[in-house]
Amino acid sequence: MTCRVARRPFDRLALEIPAEVLASTGQFDRFLLLDFDGVLHPAQAHAELGSVRPPLKEQPAAGLFIHTDQLAEQLAPYAAVGLVVHSSWRMTHIDAEIRRLLGPVGDRLVGATDRGLDGELSILQFARRLRLDPSMFRVLDDQPELLPHLVEADVVIACDPARGVSNQTAWARLEYWLSSSGSD
């Protein structure tokens, strides 16, 4: 018995493109897939709250979503970049709630990766559904070790779990990708 290994892991998923996914991506030609914990706020901030869900306006005071303004600033010149959530938050929040949580970048939300799939597979499925070339998306995550195929494809921008996207290295890698793909 032989085993065939795909060069690009997202090529092996044969999935149809749902109309609602295509409709929501129309204005975007590149995508940033986001984790929340360790990216938009320190990973520990959410863990310290446990099951407490502070009201939206109190979340920054609780240490949540404190980097959304920085992300908005960095994305401002690039209107064609949409956001997709692959964070575990997609399991407990609907897209409308996620849009509000994302504050100044919420209008860029395309949606979440498949809530029925976990981690890397949900991202690979999203990329396959939209027939995305690796140059068309990046994944912001604080646990790249959980995304080995995506790391191998060089689409993961690793964030420091305590500093998230505000980390200078992550910021520089994101800016490089944004600017190398052309501005809008």
Image (cartoon, rainbow, N blue to C red):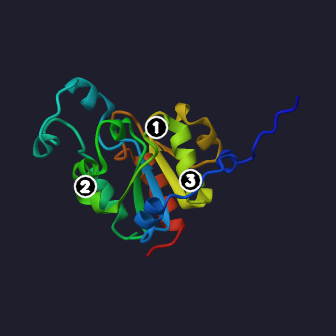
The residue carrying pointer 1 sits among few (fewer than 14), some (14 to 19) or many (20 or more) residues within 10 Å by Cα, namely: few
Instruction: Describe residue 134's horizontal placement relative to residue 8 as left or right.
Output: left
Of labels 3 and 1, earlier in sequence is: 1
Of labels 1 and 2, earlier in sequence is: 2
Which mark, by number, is residue 116? Answer: 1
The residue carrying pointer 3 sits among few (fewer than 14), some (14 to 19) or many (20 or more) residues within 10 Å by Cα, namely: many
Q: CA distance from mark 3 to mark 2?
A: 26 Å
Residue 47 rendering spot, x and y as whole percentages:
27, 25
Front of the two marks 1 and 2? 1
Of labels 3 and 2, earlier in sequence is: 2
Residue type (three-letter) at the residue carrying disc 2: Asp
Which image quarter is the C terminus in? bottom left
Q: CA distance from mark 3 to mark 1?
A: 16 Å
Identify whether 113 is placed above or below 130.
Answer: above
Question: What element does badge 3 sit on?
Answer: helix
Instruction: Describe residue 12's horizontal placement relative to residue 93 as left or right.
Output: right
Residue for badge 3:
127
* Residue at image point 35% right, 36% down: 91
